[in-house]
Image: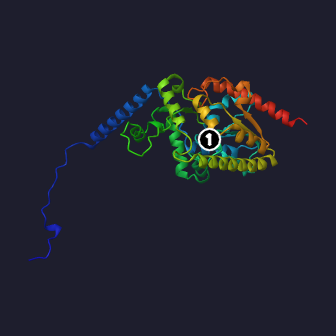
Amino acid sequence: MPSSISSSDQPVVERPVPALAWSVAAVVALITAVALIGAWEWHWRDFGATSTYRNSDGLWAIQRRVVDRVEGDKTVIVGSSRVLFDIQLPVWEELAGERPVQLALEGTSPITFFQDLANDEDFTGLLIVGVTPDLYFTDFGVRRLAALDYYRKESPSQWFGQRLSMAVEPHLAFYHEDYALFTCLRRLPWPERAGVPNYRDVRRLETMAADRNTRLWRKLEEDIAYRDYARSVWMQLGPPPGIPEAELRRMMIAGVEKAIAASRAAVEKLEKRGVEVIFVRMPSSGDFYAAENRRMPRAQSWDRLIAETGAIGVHFEDHAELQGLETPEWSHLSGADADRATRSLYGIIRTELAARRTP
């Protein structure tokens, strides 16, 4: 008796292959795919979505390379989402004859990017640094720091993929990270689990052009429910829960000291080669503005930043032209008021620079 049975001794079962022309199958698959994509696109168009360029690390890297490529003085903006949304590049260009380079990134402190430009000996001109207190003076604003690494190490395939994506982005409303299938699934009202915080994610807020000129999405001005959702997201931001008050206070002081020291060193490097630095605090409002002031009082953060760096500071509280503007979800200006604010900010900065240059 054999000790084993070879698989070759087993009967071969032949499975019938459907008599279907592969060309027909390919056409059916293509029609199905187009129908599903069309339905997904229609769904988001009906929701109010419009096509936009994606705020990717690759798009940021393109603009960072503009700083490397263009010779002579440039106006560059770093910061968080407020200067990204509120400073309108076409309006600035109309006034100055020069289009700024927009390098601000949402949910992120600009200090790392501020330092990068300070170390770039080829950068000269004017640097606008947006200050959102909760991000600038703490270690919590680290959401988009990978963009700088992407710019430094972008591979040829990443370069090509970014250009290929940009050819599609202006034409498809659903091609935004907020409408990705698994992102949508995570937003479903799943049952809450004990001890697991039920945080709301930031949803889409903007429309963006190829040069990263950005506006607040009109849905936040027109859809009250969507606006209120955004407000609820802002109100859950801040330090992690459960930290004792004394520890929070210690963390705040340490964050302010660290931010001011880094800013002072960057300003000194930039001013040595003639770069003028302008710190800008754009408007916020409502309960979010009140919460920001509680967590990061102006006297202990902004005022010290300006005093200890010696740079020009433009705080919306100090200028009537930057007050009374509409911030639908408490943190970013409406489209129309972003245009007005840009004109006002440009005039204020010109006045401040002229005063400083006068002997």
Q: Residue furthest right?
A: 359
Residue 286 in sight in this render: yes
User: In the image, is residue 3 above or below residue 148?
Assistant: below
Residue 126 in sight in this render: no
Could you say where residue 212 lies in the image, as x and y percent from the top left?
60, 36
Which residue is at 60% across, 41% downward? 105
User: In the image, is residue 138 above or below residue 36?
Assistant: below
Q: Residues within 10 Å of mark 1 (few under 14, many from 20)?
A: many
Badge 1 element: helix
Which residue is at 14% across, 57% downward? 13
Decide which of 3, 7 is in the foreground and name it: 3
User: In the image, is residue 24 above or below residue 244?
Assistant: above
Could you say where residue 68 lies in the image, as x and y percent from the top left?
69, 47
Q: Which residue carries the number 1 mark?
A: 134
Q: Amino acid at mark 1?
A: Asp
Q: Residue furthest left?
A: 1
Decide which of 121, 356 is in the foreground and name it: 356
Which residue is at 41% across, 31% downward? 41
Q: Report which quarter residue 216 is drawn in.
A: top right
Left or right of 323 on screen, residue 335: left
User: In the image, is residue 57 above or below residue 290?
Assistant: below
